[in-house]
């Protein structure tokens, strides 16, 4: 019990990341015990950041990340449509979500055989913002820290 309480206390105060201004200036907080690796910094109209406790594993490792933030150069409807098969067969569940006055979609469940978690999708101009945890081990931090702090310009 003491160990669990200590681990939760170690996460605060949180850190904040701010994405490129021209891609919606996404802002969110994450536990200070996590590290971040930015793979794509906004050049080429995309942004990709990976988060994990202590050290971010290599992208080729297949590790489910604690958090991923992506801004992809695809329309919201197209990105959401890519999950239709998993939604139809019940592997994913979709629910509406509103953050900073913008309506989006929250997906929960199995994104693949090895990735179970939650994702929120929002339209930012002609692109799509994806914020997601790839493991249910990080669900509490995703819901209570990341999503509660999420801001962006549409």
Image (cartoon, rainbow, N blue to C red):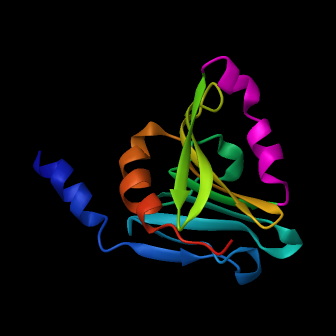
Residue 60 image offset from top left, x and y in percent: 71, 46
Mark yes or no: residue 54 visible: no
- Residue pictured at 59% horizontal, 53% vertical: 57
**Observer-nearest residue: 73 or 136?**
73
| Side of 16 relative to 125 (left or right) | left
Residue 137 image offset from top left, x and y in percent: 40, 41
The quadrant in which the N terminus is found is top left
Q: Can you say whether 2 is above or below 10 in the image?
A: above
Number of numbered discs on residues: 0
Which residue reaches farthest top? 89
Per the picture, the main secondary structure of the magenta-coloured stretch is: helix
**Observer-nearest residue: 130 or 66?**
130
Residue 82 in the magenta stretch? The answer is: yes
Residue 38 image offset from top left, x and y in percent: 67, 68
The quadrant in which the C terminus is found is bottom right
**Residue 19 occupies quadrant:** bottom right
Q: Can you say whether 67 is above or below 116 in the image?
A: below
- Residue pictured at 69% horizontal, 74% vertical: 24
- Residue pictured at 66% horizontal, 26% vertical: 87
Which residue reaches farthest left? 2
- Residue pictured at 37% horizontal, 72% vertical: 14
Which residue reaches farthest right? 44
Residue 127 image offset from top left, x and y in percent: 80, 62
| Side of 154 relative to 74 (left or right) | left
Mark yes or no: residue 8 visible: yes
Q: Can you say whether 130 is above or below 91 in the image?
A: below
- The magenta span reads 73-90
Residue 108 in the magenta stretch? The answer is: no
């Amino acid at each position: 019990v003491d160990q669990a309480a200590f681990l939760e206390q170690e996460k605060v105060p949180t850190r904040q990341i701010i994405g490129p201004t021209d891609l919606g200036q996404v802002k969110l907080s994450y536990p200070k015990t996590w590290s971040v690796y930015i793979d794509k910094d906004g050049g080429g109209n995309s942004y990709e950041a990976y988060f994990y406790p202590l050290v971010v594993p290599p992208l080729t490792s297949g590790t489910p990340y604690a958090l991923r933030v992506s801004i992809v150069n695809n329309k919201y409807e197209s990105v959401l449509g890519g999950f239709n098969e998993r939604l139809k067969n019940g592997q994913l569940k979709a629910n509406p979500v509103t953050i900073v006055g913008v309506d989006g979609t929250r997906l929960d469940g199995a994104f693949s055989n090895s990735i179970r978690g939650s994702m929120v999708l929002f339209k930012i101009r002609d692109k799509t913002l994806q914020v997601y945890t790839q493991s249910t081990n990080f669900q509490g931090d995703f819901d209570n820290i990341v999503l509660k702090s999420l801001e962006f310009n549409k």
